[in-house]
Image (cartoon, rainbow, N blue to C red):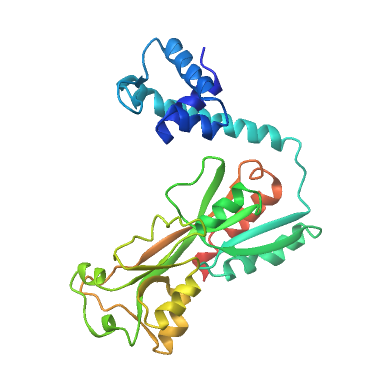
Amino acid sequence: MFSIEQLQAFVATVEVGSFSAAARRLGKAQSVVSQHIINLEVDCDTALFERSGRYPTLTEAGNKLLPQAHALLSQHQRLKNSALALTDSAPTEVTIALDEGIPFKAVTSIIAELQMKYPHVTLEFLSASSLDIIDMLRGKQALTGIIFSELNIPSDLDFECIGSVKFDLYVAKSHPLAHQTCRNIDALRLHRQLLIRSRNTQTSSFQLKISPDTWYADNYFLLLELALQAHGWCLLPSHVAHESVQSQELVKLPLEFEEMGWQANVDVLQHQRHSNLSIFKVIRELLRHQLDAL
């Protein structure tokens, strides 16, 4: 009958494209991974991979099995984390990592109440890009993360939406784009774009690369400074741009298609191992709708 190791080998092979790469990911010999998949095919009484080409490709049966395998592995991971949490006690230190583009008031407004409920817990606050915070949570450098919603949240992290932040396109008053109305998105392709990217060079799922000429930064305040120096146009949280707009150093891009900005959802993330502990439930409860009040 199926084993977790068989399903892990199957899913890893699909995700990385070969048996050898799957073996490297899983830290096993290639022969072990290949045997797991052969055993799985025997148990299923059908071939899951077509092996006639250079790289294995899924058969129709393999495609049907894949979503079920993903679901079972996710549940297995949750079960493992729940079992580990059975012996966990309330932490004495909680690190909260916050994307720089999210108003810190969303967190400061809950600190006093959290301190009253847990007076002996030490709080630490870190700032980073949303994608870097996801890595910090998985590496346990942070226990709670507050990020802009990403499409691909790792399955071992639990998340909850707590509000949204308004974004718009901005450019320096001295930039050529500030003095013309862009009739379509192609006008933006002709000018340098300033874009958020994590420290391991991942780009956010909602920060679309439009221009072939792109500069990167890992936080919105660096993007703001680059924009103020007229190095390009960028998408910024409205509250980050507000002071510079008020001083008329920065302007919203004049667009014929008026609304290129949007409301970006904000999520609170916690690892499955910790999310059911009382202090983390309280943090989520206190954070709910805080952004709506700003």
Q: In the rendering, at what x and y percent does residue 73 appear?
A: 52, 29
> Does 255 sit above or below residue 35?
below
Q: In the rendering, at what x and y percent does residue 192 appear?
A: 32, 72
267 to the left or right of 216: right
120 to the left or right of 191: right
**Residue at image location 21% in from the left, 72% down from the top:** 187
The foreground one among 218 and 110 is 218
Q: In the rendering, at what x and y percent does residue 211 appear?
A: 29, 66
The foreground one among 109 and 241 is 241
Q: In the rendering, at what x and y percent does residue 248 appear?
A: 39, 89
For this orientation, the residue located farthest to the right is 120
The reply to whether residue 70 is visible in this rendering is: no
Give the quarter of the image for residue 271. Answer: top right
For this orientation, the residue located farthest to the front is 54
The reply to whether residue 78 is visible in this rendering is: yes
Give the quarter of the image for residue 112. Answer: bottom right
> Does 241 sit above or below residue 120?
below
The foreground one among 177 and 244 is 177
> Does 225 sit above or below residue 260?
below
**Residue at image location 54% in from the left, 68% down from the top:** 100
